[in-house]
């Protein structure tokens, strides 16, 4: 039996080994910009209930979303032609991480699967597979094929078993595996706060590391697993993170940080240690994204009425410049400075909304004035005609005999 002191010592050693491995390994990022270039196949939709906005809001990410879910083979083939490189060299030089979640294996040609495999093994490409009916072992009742026996499965950290298919409806929580509580993927994250929804059943491959497991259905089922494959690394997050089911996860304050950490890890970028600072920064980035959309909508609305939005657009450009400073400081690792600059960007964005509203009110004021004059003038003109017809007719003598009456008689 392992004593508590021995357990702590093992955890410390594991954490040190992980940190040392990350330090020794060169991050797989864009050599010119330092950005992590991500291509995401599957539920890559920009909207509520999907993780795509979390990735796009990260200043360190350059995302290429490829919606692949519930589409025909022809549509998916068209999406591959549009977004996926035509040559293997372009994958290795143009991307750092590939995400596949709820995307049918049968829609990925063997050539592309081989490119992904060789990219992981020979060129340090990071691979992350998320859960869903078309992930891992698939889901037979829905006619969704699995990835078992595929080329991509060869570089995954898990075995995709047809007999253990997608588990629909069960809610569970992730708990760190014994000895891995200090692992950067699970440490300082309050996983007990959020229930996860639906998952696939998998088996970890020999040599892979299970850092998170399920608390039930059944207990100990692997949820978060990774392994090193050649020069690259692959992860499996066995949780269906898309759709209406996992609403609790998408509303969870830590969700954007969790998704970013998963991607950071497979490209060997050090995960920030100050969780509270990163939580505040990611929350403010989400707020900035929402406020930016709101400000753009107000400017567009004001312009439709001919409002002068020059001041609002100038403030918007200032906010955008400050947001670029946020990204630059973030890439340099100055997260505190990035947070301070983001606060300035939010203040500028608030000014955008206020100036746009003022311009809108000014434009609508003249609209109201014109409408008032139009309605008043119409009323006065109609009143004059009515007075002429109904009042002044008393000045005229009534006709005693009409020509028509005289002719008939």
Image (cartoon, rainbow, N blue to C red):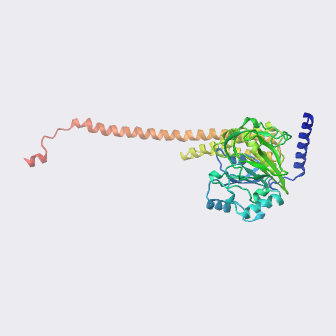
Residue 197, horizontal then vertical, whole percent: 68, 42
Q: 208 or 102: nearer the eye? A: 208
Count of numbered labels shown in the rendering: 0
Evaluate whether residue 233 shows in this view: yes
Q: Quadrant of residue 92?
A: bottom right
Evaluate whether residue 93 shows in this view: no
Q: Quadrant of residue 169?
A: top right
Left or right: 386 in relation to 235: left
Q: Residue furthest front?
A: 163
Left or right: 22 in relation to 348: right
Q: 329 or 185: nearer the eye? A: 185
State the quadrant of the N terminus: top right
Q: 242 or 274: nearer the eye? A: 242
Going 35% across and 40% down the picture, which residue do you hit?
Answer: 381
Going 54% across and 42% down the picture, which residue do you hit?
Answer: 363
Q: Quadrant of residue 376?
A: top left
Is 374 rendered above or below residue 115? above
Q: Residue furthest left?
A: 409
Residue 322, horizontal then vertical, whole percent: 74, 44
Residue 9, horizontal then vertical, whole percent: 92, 38
Residue 23, horizontal then vertical, whole percent: 89, 49
């Amino acid at each position: 039996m392992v004593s508590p002191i021995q357990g702590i010592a093992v955890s410390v050693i594991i954490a040190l080994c992980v940190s040392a491995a990350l330090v020794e390994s060169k991050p797989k990022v864009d050599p010119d910009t330092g950005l992590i270039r991500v291509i995401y196949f599957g539920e890559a939709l920009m909207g509520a209930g999907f993780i795509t906005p979390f990735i796009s809001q990260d200043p360190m990410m350059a995302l290429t979303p490829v919606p692949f879910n519930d589409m025909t083979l022809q549509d998916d083939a068209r999406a591959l032609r549009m977004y996926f490189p035509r040559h293997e060299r372009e994958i290795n030089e143009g991307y750092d991480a590939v995400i596949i979640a709820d995307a049918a294996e049968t829609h990925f040609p063997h050539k592309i699967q081989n490119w992904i495999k060789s990219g992981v093994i020979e060129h340090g490409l990071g691979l992350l597979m998320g859960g869903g009916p078309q992930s891992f072992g698939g889901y037979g009742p829905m006619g969704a094929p699995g990835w078992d026996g595929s080329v991509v499965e060869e570089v995954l950290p898990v075995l995709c078993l047809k007999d253990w298919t997608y588990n629909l409806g069960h809610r569970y929580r992730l708990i760190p595996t014994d000895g891995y509580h200090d692992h950067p993927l699970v440490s300082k994250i309050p996983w007990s706060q959020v229930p996860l929804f639906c998952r696939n059943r998998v088996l970890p491959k020999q040599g892979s590391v299970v850092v998170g497991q399920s608390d039930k259905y059944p207990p100990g089922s692997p949820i978060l697993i990774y392994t090193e494959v050649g020069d690259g690394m692959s992860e499996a997050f066995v949780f269906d993170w898309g759709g209406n089911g996992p609403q609790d996860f998408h509303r969870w304050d830590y969700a954007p940080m969790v998704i970013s950490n998963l991607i950071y890890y497979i490209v060997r970028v050090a995960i920030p240690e100050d969780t509270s600072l990163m939580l505040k920064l990611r929350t403010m980035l989400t707020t900035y994204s929402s406020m930016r959309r709101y400000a753009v909508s107000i400017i567009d609305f004001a312009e439709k009425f001919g409002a002068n939005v020059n001041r609002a657009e100038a403030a918007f450009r200032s906010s955008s410049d400050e947001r670029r400073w946020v990204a630059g400081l973030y890439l340099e690792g100055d997260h505190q400075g990035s947070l301070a600059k983001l606060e300035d960007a939010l203040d500028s964005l608030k000014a955008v909304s206020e100036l746009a509203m003022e311009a809108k009110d000014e434009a609508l004021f003249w609209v109201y004035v014109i409408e008032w004059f139009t309605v008043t003038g119409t009323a006065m003109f109609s009143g004059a005609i009515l007075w002429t017809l109904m009042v002044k007719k008393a000045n005229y003598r009534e006709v005693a005999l009409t020509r028509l009456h005289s002719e008939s008689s």
